[in-house]
Amino acid sequence: MSKSHQLAKRLREVILDGTWVANTNYKDQLTGLDWKTAITHFDRLNSIAVLAQHIHYYLKGVSQVLAGGTLDIRDQYSFDFPLIAAQAEWDAFLEQFWADAEVFAAQVEALPEEQLDQPFVAEKYGTYLRNIDCMMEHGYYHLGQIVLIKKLLQGKR
């Protein structure tokens, strides 16, 4: 199995279907979650919806580069999203998240092995491999927060 294929498999695990590292994934945690719970803040923590949108923001930004586009995402905007105001909006976001995650994983899977060690956009951003690895690490970091926030919100009821 190529390194690109292994990376794509791990990306799918954290977002779509895996249980290897955290015994869960984004799709498992967010599917069936009602929008009111998703947008609820516990104390001063980010909401589950904002955390999911934050990961999606970076996924889309890196995916755009893999598709031959420019790197347009900026950390300063990575938590700025319109408030979700209905279940249909939340469901539509989730469907887009799952679709975009699959596109991203397929793009990673198609990367030539030698490209993984090449600079990602500019040398200051490291290599393609580093950026893809960071997407997974970042994803697991916020997945853990989502799991904890869900538990805190359930205990609040």
Image: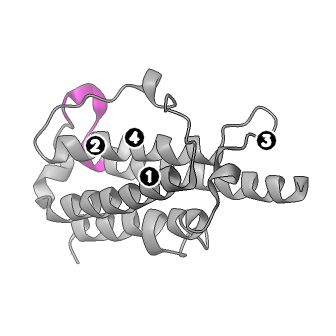
Residue that badge 2 annotates: 62
Residue that badge 1 annotates: 93
State the residue at coordinates (34%, 59%): 101
Examine the rendered structure and indicate whether residue 43 appears above or below residue 12. above
N-terminal of the pair, mark 2 or mark 3, is 3
**Comparing labels 4 and 1, the label whose residue is closer to the camera:** 1
Residue 77 percent across, percent down from the top left: 44, 25
Residue that badge 4 annotates: 57
Circles 1, 2 touching at the beta carbon (< 8 Å): no
Examine the rendered structure and indicate whether residue 9 appears above or below residue 70. below
Q: Is residue 110 magenta?
A: no
Along the horizontal axis of the image, is 4 left or right of 28? left
Q: Secondary structure at mark 3?
A: loop
Q: Which residues are magenta?
A: 121-129
Residue 10 percent across, percent down from the top left: 39, 67
Circles 1, 3 touching at the beta carbon (< 8 Å): no
N-terminal of the pair, mark 4 or mark 1, is 4
Q: CA distance from mark 2 to mark 3?
A: 30 Å
Badge 2 local density, few (<14 within 10 Å), some, or many (20+)?
many
Q: Secondary structure at mark 1?
A: helix
N-terminal of the pair, mark 1 or mark 2, is 2
Q: CA distance from mark 1 to mark 2?
A: 18 Å
State the residue at coordinates (60%, 68%): 32
State the residue at coordinates (58%, 48%): 142
Residue that badge 3 annotates: 42
Circles 2, 3 touching at the beta carbon (< 8 Å): no
N-terminal of the pair, mark 4 or mark 2, is 4
